[in-house]
């Protein structure tokens, strides 16, 4: 299919008017090929298809007018400006220029005719246009107006609007020569009522005068949806294909037979919920396969994911394989260590520990035991996957709370555990419920299980929203709760991003609270403390040797102290919903009625008010994540703003949600009936960034 002029490879520098310098600038906009020019869609449109009588102008309109200069004069107000009054018989309009050349001034003299385009604003005497585009007309001249709407493209420094217009003109001309293949078959187009690619591109760049501007500017015109559809399809396909390829990879089949899983479950002080049981069964079925499991377990905070992981780990150990359990922070890893040790050691299984802080001799011993196979389970942080860590036979990797990982990292981890041709199974757990829309485009390489039930006896956390002017009341609440033998968290969050400032604020708060509440045992944890001190402090809190724990958001995920029944969160209005939900999930883990106090500093913006209302009114993590997605976008929900994991050129996961069902259907159809088109579609939209599409 490829020929020399295929627009997806034709560099933009081959277009007229583009040299090395502008090519570099265009690259900033993601434009490197002619195809990129075509996928760089207008942000909005201007209607220059007709001349509007001046008398019919409304404020805020962008319009073309034509008229005769009645008066041109310099005005010396706060800033020197050139004022040009133009009239067309129906009314008068003033053009205002703050920057102008001598030539411009001499050009617009009384009696000459101008064709003008600009935005109409209210002026002191007549309506005004500030810095309009204009052109002087010769006697009797009346140039044609545009026959299509004028595209306004997103620009960047050094790339002019007119340049982009000229480039898209050229790209559209090349398109006429059929240089951009259609990868969606006639069949697919008609099933999903999509227009063809060429029509869609021509339309969005140069819409006809009677186009529905509103739909276009909202990005929901059928031609735009056609393009978004293909892009979403490409992302979905790349992950689906990855999943299919994983089915062809080999892993040790971890079979039933031993009894460790059942013995572990039998030794627990509680009965598993139906949901936990179901998810464990799903996981065990995966483990028995000869290809590596890649399964995501989603379960709201407190749904009991840890024990599900442990039961699964037991199956691996029963098969003579090792298990690596990884958490994102030492705090969490340490908690897993405690749980796993408590559950497994009585059964004669050894659990080891490896974090970045384990060094020297201790580290050498752990590494030795891992390589020799003496250690069956190892818990830790990223350190588990450093180069010098060698496993005897790693059968299963458990990753907790890792929703901040992208697909590349998932694959890298799996590859590190590779033993010859055999890959380890992978279980990923997350407490951030991932709305389906995101799951389909970002997690389609994973199978998913959901623990959709909380252990019995949990009472929903009561949430109240209180301004920080009522701090005294809040402190009284802490006093009362602790007097009744409960424990409390006080979470300090700061406006500043800086961690050190957060820690300082937490220190200050801890000091004040210690003074105000002398009868309580107050302690502090923050991110700047030594790991050992943190762990020590958490252990003391868990053992109820501390009443009030002042903390930064380090305790956001995973920490489990059932006797803690009160949580105070300062500056709650600054945090995302999912984060608030995670924090709140630290309480309500026992059989006690728990509460969460969201303190805010007024006045609240409308958005903040809305968000706090959501968190007050619902305890359902999925529902909260859906709101978060709508209010703040996918990057915030997943915490991937920095990593740029979610990047689409045209599609918008929120705006285009309704397309996702069709995308999923179309992907299934393509993989089955038109597999030859899969690769080209993925390549077109993910291009070079699609390393993971090639594994
Ligand atoms: P999360 O899903 O948030 O990681 P954890 O695994 O930390 O939740 O479990 C939360 C608490 O619930 C722990 O104290 C755990 O021992 C307890 N738990 C887990 N499953 C059950 C159950 N079926 N019945 C009662 N308590 C349970
Ligand atoms: Mg957990």
Image (spheres, rainbow, N blue to C red):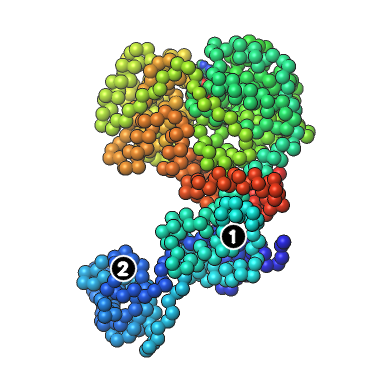
Query: Viewed as shown, does residue 392 lie left or right of 597?
Result: right
- Residue under the image location 64 percent in, 70 percent down: 177
- Residue 268 picture location, percent across and down: 57, 12
Between residue 188 and residue 276, name the one nearer to us.
188
Image quarter of residue 482: top left
Q: How far separated are the C-alphas under marks 1 and 2?
A: 38 Å
Q: Residues within 10 Å of mark 2 (few under 14, many from 20)?
A: many
Asked if residue 53 is positioned above or below residue 283 in the image, the reply reads: below
**Residue at image x 54%, y 65%?**
202
Residue 412, image quadrant:
top right
- Would you place residue 497 above or below residue 587 in this image? below
Please name whichever residue, 30 or 300, is drawn nearer the observer in this view of the structure.
Answer: 300
Q: Which residue is mark 2?
A: 120
Q: Residue at x 39, y 23 (%)?
A: 461
* Mark 1 crowdedness (10 Å alpha carbons): few <14, some 14-19, many ≥20: some
Query: Viewer-proximal residue, 360 or 405?
Result: 405
Report the quarter where the C terminus lies.
top right
Q: Which residue is mark 1?
A: 196
Q: Is residue 610 visible?
A: yes
| 349 sits left or right of 401 in the view | right
């Amino acid at each position: 299919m490829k020929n020399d002029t295929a627009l997806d490879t034709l560099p933009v520098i081959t277009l007229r008017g583009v040299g090395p310098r502008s090519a570099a600038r265009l690259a900033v906009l993601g434009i490197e090929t002619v195809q990129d020019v075509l996928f760089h869609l207008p942000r909005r449109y201007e209607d220059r298809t007709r001349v509007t009588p001046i008398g019919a102008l409304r404020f805020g309109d962008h319009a073309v007018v034509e008229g005769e200069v009645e008066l041109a004069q310099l005005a010396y107000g706060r800033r020197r400006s050139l004022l040009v009054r133009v009239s067309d018989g129906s009314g008068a309009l003033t053009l205002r220029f703050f920057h102008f050349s001598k030539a411009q001034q001499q050009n617009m003299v009384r009696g000459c005719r101008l064709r003008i385009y600009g935005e109409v604003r209210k002026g002191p005497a007549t309506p005004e246009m500030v810095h309009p585009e204009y052109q002087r007309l010769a006697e009797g001249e009346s140039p044609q107006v545009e026959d299509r709407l004028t595209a306004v493209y997103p620009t960047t420094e050094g790339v002019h609007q007119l340049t982009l217009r000229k480039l898209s003109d050229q790209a559209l001309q090349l398109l006429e020569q059929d240089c951009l293949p259609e990868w969606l078959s006639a069949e697919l187009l008609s099933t999903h009522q999509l227009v063809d690619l060429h029509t869609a591109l021509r339309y969005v760049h140069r819409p006809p005068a009677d186009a529905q501007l509103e739909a276009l500017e909202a990005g929901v015109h059928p031609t735009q949806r056609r393009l978004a559809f293909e892009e979403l399809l490409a992302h979905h396909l790349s992950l689906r294909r990855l999943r299919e390829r994983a089915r062809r990879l080999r892993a040790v089949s971890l079979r039933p037979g031993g009894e460790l899983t059942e013995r572990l479950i039998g030794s627990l002080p509680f009965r598993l919920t139906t949901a936990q049981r179901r998810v464990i069964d799903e996981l065990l079925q995966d483990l028995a396969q000869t290809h590596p499991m890649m399964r995501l377990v989603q379960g709201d905070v407190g749904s009991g994911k840890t024990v599900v992981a442990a039961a699964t780990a037991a199956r691996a150990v029963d098969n003579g394989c090792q298990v690596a359990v990884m958490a994102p922070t030492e705090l969490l890893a340490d908690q897993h260590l405690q749980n796993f040790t408590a559950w497994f050691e009585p059964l004669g299984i050894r659990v080891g520990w490896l974090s970045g802080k384990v060094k020297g001799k201790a580290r050498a011993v752990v590494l030795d035991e891992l390589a020799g196979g003496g250690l069956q389970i190892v818990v830790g942080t990223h350190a588990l996957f450093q180069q010098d860590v060698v496993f005897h036979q790693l059968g299963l990797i458990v990753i907790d709370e890792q929703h901040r990982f992208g697909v590349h990292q998932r694959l890298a981890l799996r590859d590190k555990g590779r033993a010859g041709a055999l890959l380890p199974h992978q279980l990923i757990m997350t407490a951030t419920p991932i709305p389906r829309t995101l799951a389909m485009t970002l997690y389609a390489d994973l199978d998913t299980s959901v623990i959709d039930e909380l252990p019995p006896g949990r009472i929903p956390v009561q949430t109240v929203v209180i301004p920080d002017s009522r701090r005294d009341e809040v402190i009284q609440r802490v006093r009362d709760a602790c007097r009744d033998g409960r424990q409390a968290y006080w979470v300090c969050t700061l406006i500043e991003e800086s961690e050190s400032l957060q820690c300082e604020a937490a220190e200050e708060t801890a000091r004040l609270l210690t003074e105000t509440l002398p009868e309580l045992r107050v302690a502090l944890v923050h991110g700047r403390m030594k790991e050992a001190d943190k762990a020590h402090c958490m252990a003391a809190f868990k053992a109820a040797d501390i009443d009030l724990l002042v903390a930064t958001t380090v305790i956001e995920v995973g920490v489990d102290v059932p006797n803690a029944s009160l949580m105070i969160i300062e500056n709650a209005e600054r945090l995302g919903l999912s984060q608030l939900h995670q924090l709140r999930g630290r309480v309500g883990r026992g059989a006690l009625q728990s509460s969460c106090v969201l303190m805010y500093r007024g006045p609240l913006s409308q958005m903040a008010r809305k968000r706090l209302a959501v968190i007050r009114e619902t305890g359902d993590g999925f529902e909260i994540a859906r709101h978060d997605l709508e209010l703040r976008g996918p990057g915030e929900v997943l915490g991937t703003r920095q990593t740029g994991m979610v990047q689409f050129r045209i599609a918008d996961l929120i705006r285009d949600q309704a397309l996702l069902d069709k995308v999923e259907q179309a992907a299934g159809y393509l993989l089955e009936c038109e597999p030859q088109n899969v690769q080209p579609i993925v390549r077109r939209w993910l291009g070079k960034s699609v390393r993971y599409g090639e594994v």
